[in-house]
Every structure is written in C-alpha cells, then in structure tokens.
Amino acid sequence: MKQVFSTFAKQNQESNKTIAGLLEKMSNDDREKDRKSYYKSLSGLFCHNTGATAYFLSLMQNAVPDNAEAQKAVKPLAKIQELKGKLSEEQWKQAVTFSRIADSALINFVKALEDKDFDAPVKIGWYKGKPPAVPLKFMLEQSIAHNFHHRGQISQILDSLKIDNDYSGINIKFM
C-alpha cells in the first residue's frame, strides 16, 4: 500500500510541476481571467489544489501523533499562506513555491508512514458526523483524487485555449 501511495504522491508532484510550468508561460492577466470554474481562474484552481493538499495533510497528521517522521514531514506546511482572489505576478510565484512545499510534504508524509498508520482514524467534520472518522488510507486516496480532479479542470480550460498540455498522456518522468 505504501508503495502505491508513494507512486501517486510522486506523480502528483510531477503533474503539478508540469501544470505550473504551463501556467507560468501565460500572462498574469490570462492566468487570472475568470474562466467560469468554481474557483474562477486557472491560478484559483491551482491554489485551491495546494491549499487542499495542506488541509488533507493537517487532518492526516493528527491521526498519527506518535509518528515523529510523519510530524516532521508536514512542518514545512507552516510556510504556506492561503492565496485567494486575483493574484499578482509575485503572488503567483509564491503559489508555485507553496505547491512545491505541499507536494514534497505529501511525499515525505507517505514515506514516513508505517503499515499500521494506514488504518489510523482521521477525524472529519463533514457528513453530519457519520462517520466521525475515516481510515488514513481513504483520506490519502481522497487527497490524490482531489488533485487529479482539479488538474483535469485546468487541462480542460487549457484545451479550450488551444494550449497543448497532454494531461491525459502518461507522465512517467518521476519514476
């Protein structure tokens, strides 16, 4: 199980790096234009993904309080600031840096997990308390799926702009 999640975390990092590279080539105005997605702009979608990764990790870290390496892995997340609304060019650069921090934290967190940790209960505050917690492995899966979902939205917008992104191609640089 650890190897599977490790592969997904590394693929997540490489895909986010690729998407950031494509978005960095755009003008700030084009990146910030309202594209009619829930998070409005391309940078809004990108920032949402980073923030969600940090959020999921904060929930998961609470499930393994005695795993010192897992706790250490998420410490760099304290550097991440929530960026909302239209971003300046400087804020966009911060968003890319924050994405790299979150992606590395996810990789290091998974690397630190022990077999027993994957079943640790992660407390959640939605579903009206039913269930009050889910296994850490489920939360990891949700985090990865969430990233795929929003990168897919970014890819669709890039497709509509005729910006080649080959998001559906198999990215194996990370292997």
Image (tube, grey):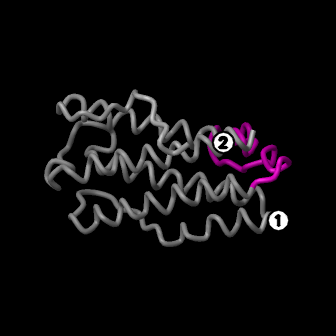
Q: Quadrant of the C terminus?
A: top right
Residue 99 placement, left or right of 87: right
Compare residues 86 and 151 and report the one nearer the observer. 151
Residue at mark 2: 5
| Residue 39 drawn above or below residue 51 | above
Crowd around label 2: few <14 · some 14–19 · many ≥20 (10 Å): some
Q: How many marks?
A: 2
Q: Position of residue 133 (x, y in %)?
A: 74, 44
Q: What residue do we see at 25% from left, 53% from top?
A: 24
Compare residues 136 and 39 and report the one nearer the observer. 136
Mark 1 or mark 2, whichever is nearer to me: 2
Residue at mark 1: 66
User: Disc 1, disc 2: CB below 8 Å?
Assistant: no
Which range is magenta? 113-140
Identify the mark nearer the N-term, 1 or 2: 2
**126 magenta-colored:** yes
Residue 100 placement, left or right of 110: left
**146 magenta-colored:** no
